[in-house]
Image (tube, rainbow, N blue to C red):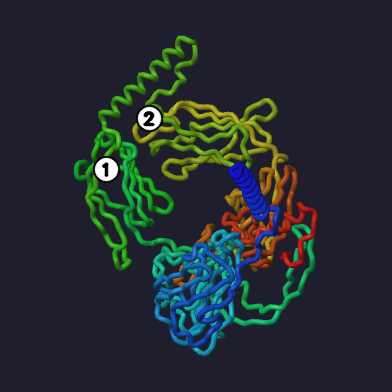
Amino acid sequence: MNDIQNERQTRKFTVFLLSFISLMVFSCARMGSPDGGWYDETPPKVLSATPKDGATNVKTKKIKILFDEYIKIDNPSEKVIISPPQIEAADIKAAGKQIVIDLKDTLLENTTYTIDFSDAISDNNENNPMGNFTYSFSTGEVIDTLEVSGYVLEAENLEPVKGIMVGLYKETEDSIQSLPMQRISRTDGSGHFVIKGVAPGSYRIYALQDADENYYFNQKSEKIAFTDQIIVPSAKPDIRQDTVWRDSLHIETINRIGYTHFLPDDIELRAFTHIQTDRYLVKTERKEPDHFTFYFSYGSEWLPDIKGLNFDETDAFVIDTNEKQDTITYWLRDTTLINQDTLRMEVQFVMTDTLGELQLKTDTMEMLSKIPYAKRLKLKQKEFDEWKKTQEKAKKKGDPYDSIMPPSSLNVKINVPQQLDPDVNIRFTAPCPLEKADSSMIHLYAKHDTLWYESRFLFRQLNTLEYELVGEWRPEIEYSLEIDSAAFVDIYGNVSKPSKNGFKVKSNDDYSTLLVTVTGMNNKTIVVQLLSGSDAVVKQVSTDKGYAEFYYIKPGEYYMRMFIDENLNGKWDTGDFEQQLQPEPVYYYPSALQCKAKWDVSETWNPLERKLFLQKPSKLVKQKADKKKTVKNRNAERAKQKGIELPANLRK
């Protein structure tokens, strides 16, 4: 009997215990569920710091900052900026609820130090960002609190420059080529910078893409920006608006808050890279057996002098150079040299020595054909056999097999679209230098009513391989370009076959016209450029009359840019720090232009009306602004889902 009672009591206890455990698990599950309470959306707060923030007469190089919750630092090596700059990088770590900074450089006397964390600090659990936070202390009696700010833009296209260092020098100690900067900052994705902890005085300001991290300009390859403006920091009391939101859609209130407005806050720096004038041989190559090429880092009027070691160089080449004369191609005239797999030569050319002076250098080189002569013969025989087969097939079908071009024929490419724009000319591109280009064997006919008439044209050579036919194109007129056999003969005796191309010039009604009146330039020579949506130049006009006219614009959306052509060479030129020469000024029309067929669009533009950092249309900006870290506002969304009002203590 006792055993039965004991068994019943045991069962009751077991049932009670299981019920209790189930109840506890259910309760815990409810406490942890998303519907059980509000999210933590409170950013970390500083409780204390050692030394305290704003302390003076500081001697220690170890700093501890304590927060009210566990925190983390995002990418401290890039986001945390210490000023004055540290030659030896400081050790910055998050440890639980505190940040520990260990400065490695010797502390400077009577100097304000700022440690700008930007938006790198957030709490460990919910990633709530603290917002911009700067800690400062002084090794002297006074702590400096002034700030200056502005933007760094690419001089050529006003693109924001992200991550470039910006620094100040006292006006009396201006020497960016020999001394490190005194106060520094880095730009964000908008090109914006803020330099903090600045003492009263007069300064010069620079931006520098510091490749070797020594905090001064000592390499021409480093991007740099400078200005003649003297920076005089100041501050004044001001008012700003602070919006408190009830939820994601409704404003609770707009408060007017007093703050200290630091000036100047609109400094503009135009960053540029010097032209690399050091000259050296980058590489040589012989892609095809009939020519070889020298690639130099910079051009020179003095072309290389070649002496053949296993061939006679006398009248052996047709020399082709690009506009900068840094790429030089030697076309071999003699087929025996083309068939020679290795050309050994002594080459004399100019290059820059260690002192930056141009000196003559002599080198022995070998130009090796990528494909050996024996293999080339096999490939040519195969090509010839395939041509014979094609001819035989055409002959059996009754097709005009004589029109099939043999492998040895000269194929000059003619760029003739079926619909030609009235302001476009026809390009001819030869595969190798021509011995003859006979314009008398080129015929252009225009159709009027039902009859064809000869039309005048100009045929001219643009460079070694390119030619251009300029015609008197009339809208809505059909043309026929007919070229006789052997109109072109290359240096190897290959001749071109006859060809015929028909095309029609488009109607004026297919285009738009843009007339731009530019003010504020005081009769300076300017180059106005019409741009596509990808910031590429579609058309450009050089003028000193204060207006630019664009004709035959295809319908679409366009943008506009201009630069002051200070040296009148028709192209944009970069700056030179040694000569204190700024890059040529560039401006953007701040909005898109809609050009429609049959429309004449007129615009008046004063490029000086807006600050440079406000000019470039956002659609053209490739360097987008950094995504701002914000609290996720999940509580507002939860209140909306529940249909209740967000408690006042949780409103932002």
Instruction: List the residue tagged with mark 2.
Output: 494
Q: Viewed as shown, does residue 349 lie left or right of 573?
A: left
Front one among 423 and 14? 14
Q: Residue furthest front?
A: 1
Q: Viewed as shown, does residue 134 lie left or right of 640?
A: left
Front one among 304 and 643? 643
Looking at the image, which residue is at 43% across and 70% down? 91
Q: Residue furthest top?
A: 396
Residue 643, how many percent across, how many down?
A: 80, 54
Instruction: List the residue tagged with mark 1.
Output: 367
Q: In which image quadrant can residue 302 be found?
A: bottom left
Looking at the image, which residue is at 62% across and 77% down? 264
Q: CA distance from mark 2 to mark 1?
A: 25 Å
Front one among 489 and 395? 395
What secondary structure is marked by label 2? loop
The amino acid beneath tag 1 is Met
Residue 549 appearing in the image: no
Residue 117 appearing in the image: yes
